[in-house]
Image (cartoon, rainbow, N blue to C red):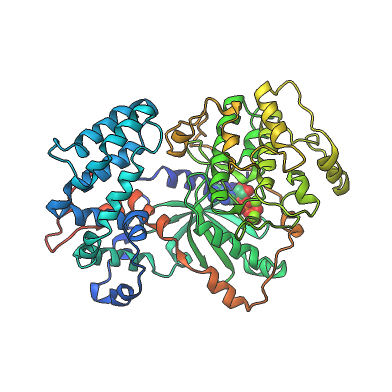
Amino acid sequence: MEIENMVANSALIKAREGGGGKGRSWKWKEMLRFPHISQCTDLAMNIERDYYSVCVRQPIGKRLFQLFCRSRPDLQNYMSLQNALDAFETKADEDRKESGINIIQRFLMSQSSQCIPILLKHGESCIQSMEADPCVDVFHQCSEDLHKHLSGEPFIQYQDSMFFDRFLQWKMLERQPISKKQFRQYSLLGKGGFGEVWACQVRATGMMYACKKLEKTHVKKRRGESMALNEKEILEGLDSRFVVNLAYAYETKHFLCMVLTMMSGGDLRFHIYNIGEPGLERNRVCFYAAEVCCGILHLHQKSIVYRDLKPENILLDDNGHIRISDLGLAVRLSEGRLVRGRVGTLGYMAPEVISHDHYGMSADWWGLGCLIYEMTAGQPPLRARGEHPNTSEMERRIKKQQEEYNNKFSHDVKDLCSLLLTKDPKQRLGCHGSKGKDVQFHPFFKKINFRMLEAGLVNPPFKPDPRQVYCSDVQDIEEFSSVKGVTLDQMDNSFYSKFNTGSVPITWQNEMIETGCFRELNVFGPSGSRTPDLDW
Ligand code: ADP
Ligand code: MG
Ligand code: MG
C-alpha cells in the first residue's frame, strides 16, 4: 500500500472511531441552523401532506408527530401503544409472547386503565392469534386502526401546531443544496467503471459514508447517463437494511456523486479469496446467502430485477452484516412485463439472459445460486479459479454444461445450488408463484430465523476487524460495455439536474437522529428546554 494511502487510511480509521458528536465540524450548529418559520411558507404550501409519509415513514416526522401527541392528554395511550408495538417488533421470538400478551392486557382490555376504546374489539382475536403463533403479524389490524384514528383529527390539529412548524424547519434544512463543501474526503475505497469510491464524512454531523464519484466525461463518452440516473433513482426509492442506502446525490464541476451507506468490511470477493483458503465456512455462507436473499426479495417486491449478483457487489459493514450494492444494472419492470437484454457479468449471467430471451426475477435466483456456489467452493461455477474461458465457451457452459460439486458441498447446499442453477427458469427454485419465499424455506436455511434477520436481530457469524481496511482491487471496467440500455438523447445539463437532487429524506433524517444532532437541536421555546425524553 502506498504511503499516502496509509496516511489516509489511518485518518479514516480515526474518523470511524469518532461518534458521540466527535467528527462534527466546530461550526456544526451554524450549518444546521433552523430557518425562521416565516421562511417556510412556500414549503408549507407545497409539501406533501400524506399522513403515512409525514407521520410514519419519515423518521423525524414520526418523532415530531409523537411529540405533538404527547402534548395531548387524550392521545397518551395511543403513543404508549405505538411505542409498545415498535418495541414488540424488535423482540426475539422467545420473548414475543410475553411482550404481546402484556400489550393486549394494557391496551386492549376494558379493565385496564390504559385501554383504548376504539381498539377493544381486537382484543379477542389478538389473544387467539398470539396463542396460535406469536411470530406472525399479530397486531396488524390493531395498528391499522391506530393509524386510522391518528390520521384523522389529530393529524389535522398537528398541522396547526408548533411541532409541524418544526417539521417544516427540518425539511428546509434537509432541502438545502448539497455540494462537496459539506463533506470531508478520506481514503479511496474502490474503483468502478466510471470513477472511484471514497470514504467521506458529513461535516455537520460527523456521519461516515462512501461517496461514489462518476466522472462526467467518462459517463458521457461511454453513454452512461441513463445507467447513472437509473442507479440513483432506484436507490432513492429503496429502504432496506440489505441494500445500500443513498443519502445524497449531488454534482461538482467534474463529478456526479452518490453518497452511500459506508460499508467498510470489504466485499465478499475479498473475503472469499484473500483471507486464508478460498471459500467461506458454512455458517457464513448461510448467513450471507440469507441476507442477500432478503435484499433480493425487497427489490423484487418493488418489481426491480437486480441482474448483477456476484461476490464483489456484496459488501460487509463494520458489524459483519452485508448489503447489496452497485445497482447500475438493476431495472424496474412495469406491470408484470419482462425485460430483455444481455446484462450483467458474463460468468454470472443466467442462461435466459445470455439467450436474449425475455426474463424477470429468475435472473437473480440464478445469481444467488452462483454466489452460494462460489462462497462454498472458493471458485465460481462452471470455471476454475483464474480460468477465463472466451465468451462463446462460457456461453456454451452456462447453457449446456452441468456444474460440478466437490466434497466441500454438504447435501443441503448442493441441493440448493442445483435448484437455483436450474437452466430452465420455469423449473428454477424461486421462480414459481411464491415470489421467492420458497428459497427461504429450503432446508439449507433451516437455522435462519428470517423474521429476526429482517429486524436486524441476528448477530453476524464474523465481525471484520475495525482496525483493518479491507481493500480489494476491483477491475470490472469491462462490465458495462455489454449493456444495451436505452439512451435518452437529452442535453447534459438537464441530465445533471435530474441527478442532482440533494438529500434523500429518510436517510438524511436517520443521519440526524443517529448522530444525535436531532436530539441536540430539536429544542423548543426561548428557554431552550430540551424535548421531553421519550422512549428514543
Ligand atoms: P461500479 O458500478 O462502477 O462497478 P461500484 O458501485 O461497484 O462501482 O463501486 C466500485 C467499488 O467501490 C466496489 O467494488 C467497492 O470496492 C467500493 N464500494 C462501492 N460502494 C461502496 C460502499 N458503499 N462502501 C464501501 N465501498 C464501496
Ligand atoms: Mg461494481
Ligand atoms: Mg455498477
Q: Is residue 136 visible?
A: yes
Determine the image quadrant of residue 439. Answer: top right
Count numbered badges in the picture.
0
- Residue 485 vs 263, above or below: the answer is below
**Which residue corresponds to the image point at 73% horizontal and 37% vertical from the top-left?**
421
**Which residue corresponds to the image point at 50% horizontal and 66% vertical from the top-left?**
250
**Which residue corresponds to the image point at 28% horizontal and 40% vertical from the top-left?**
122
- Is 66 left or right of 439, judged from the image as shown? left
- Is 521 left or right of 397, judged from the image as shown? left
Determine the image quadrant of residue 429. Answer: top right
- Residue 241 vs 181, above or below: the answer is above
The x and y percentages for residue 101 are 27, 30
Single out the residue that lies furthest toward the bottom: 491
The x and y percentages for residue 527 are 11, 60
Q: Is residue 536 visible?
A: no
- Residue 486 vs 426, above or below: the answer is below
- Residue 328 vs 85, above or below: the answer is below
The x and y percentages for residue 172 are 33, 68
The x and y percentages for residue 286 are 58, 30
**Which residue corresponds to the image point at 79% horizontal and 55% vertical from the top-left?**
356
Q: Observer-nearest residue: 344 or 430?
A: 430
Quadrant location of the N terminus?
top right
Determine the image quadrant of residue 272. Answer: top right
Quadrant location of the C terminus?
top left
